[in-house]
Amino acid sequence: MSKPVVLITGANGEIGRSLLERLHADGRYEAVTVDLTPLPERYRALCRETYAGNIMDRYLLDQVAAHHEIEVVFHLAALLSTRGERDPELAHQVNVEGTLHLLRVANNQSQRLGRAVRFVFPSSIAIYGLPDVPAKTKAGRVGEEEWNVPITMYGCNKLYCEHLGRYFTRHFRQMGALATASRLDFRAIRFPGLISAETVPTGGTSDFGPEMLHAAAQGKPYKCFVGPEAKIPFMAMPDAVESMLLLLEADRERLTDTVYNVGAFSVSAGDIAARVKQLFPAADITYEPDPVRARIVDSWPEDVDDTRARKDWDWKPAYDFDRAMDEYLMPGIRRRYAPDSP
Ligand code: AKB
């Protein structure tokens, strides 16, 4: 009996690599991947099939859907917030047009199968837009419906794609003959800043957290692009992957919405730096705030209210800040940068 197939876009990215390893370890699904860059052999070995290509290539996506009976989509490919501000038009094309192509593929597959393809979508705290630091401090832990006024193209893209996913799930072609045909089952998670022991993100504005840690582990000086007081929610990568799999397997009857906050720990750049210096006493961390990137981080909430996820699908983070540093990041980082590390 062949295993259900999951399609992962952006599989060669931070979340994608961790997700591939977890899916392979769990053994329930077979992964087919699409990414701009070819997967390294270590990850190719975890997949049924890998495709190097662009999610803007409709022909490629249709070919993948024709060759594999896709039951689940993890659509991870995106241009993150800082990269998106350098090329907003490209960010819109990849983040919105690309997502629309994937929604079309998943919806067509749902109609072919006669049942909903589950579509797991990583949204972001970037969809929030607090006007200034006093408002951010006063707002504290924000709920899903609060402050949905993003100030980056990436945040606008993610917020719009949340609505697109809800439309495809509940209203697609509501006027036409297909009104009763199977539609996809879109499920979105608004991720905080993610910190991985294995990889360093590129193109994000929450990157100061992981960048600081990985620089210290390599004995490199780090100039932080936000001030020490800049505070946002963060999460260890294993919790991010766990949250996607929990939401994927959640009973659809329990889901009261298609979009969920998830949180783990809210820390400032100064908090991270202090902890990094405890672990790497020689760490050379200085602050050279980039006004634009600091403004973006200041527009993001200090923390998120994830009550809805805890109630609807039993979300609970396994890693608080201390456990993330002591039990996941430090052991992983030391392995990652050990002299004989592959
Ligand atoms: C970014 O910094 O753009 C992302 C995010 C917070 O979604 N890591």
Image (cartoon, rainbow, N blue to C red):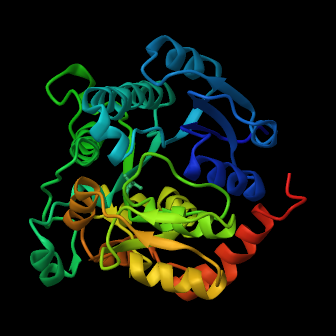
Q: Residue at x 68, y 58 (%)?
A: 198
Q: Residue at x 30, y 79 (%)?
A: 229
Q: Is residue 238 visible?
A: no
Up-down: is 279 above or below 40?
A: below
Question: Which of the 4 image quarters holds residue 197?
Answer: bottom right
Question: Which of the 4 image quarters holds residue 277?
Answer: bottom right
Q: Is residue 166 visible?
A: yes
> Which of the pair 336/43 is nearer the observer?
336
Residue 257: % across, % down: 27, 60
Q: Residue at x 42, y 27 (%)?
A: 111
Residue 334: % across, % down: 76, 71
Question: Which of the 4 image quarters holds residue 268?
Answer: bottom left
Residue 24: % across, % down: 75, 51
Up-down: is 162 above or below 245?
A: above
Up-down: is 337 above or below 174?
A: below
Residue 53: % across, % down: 56, 21
> Which of the pair 310/177 is nearer the observer?
310
Up-down: is 173 above or below 161?
A: above
Q: If the image is split into quadrants, where does the N terminus sit?
A: top right
Ligand 1 placement by image quarter: bottom left
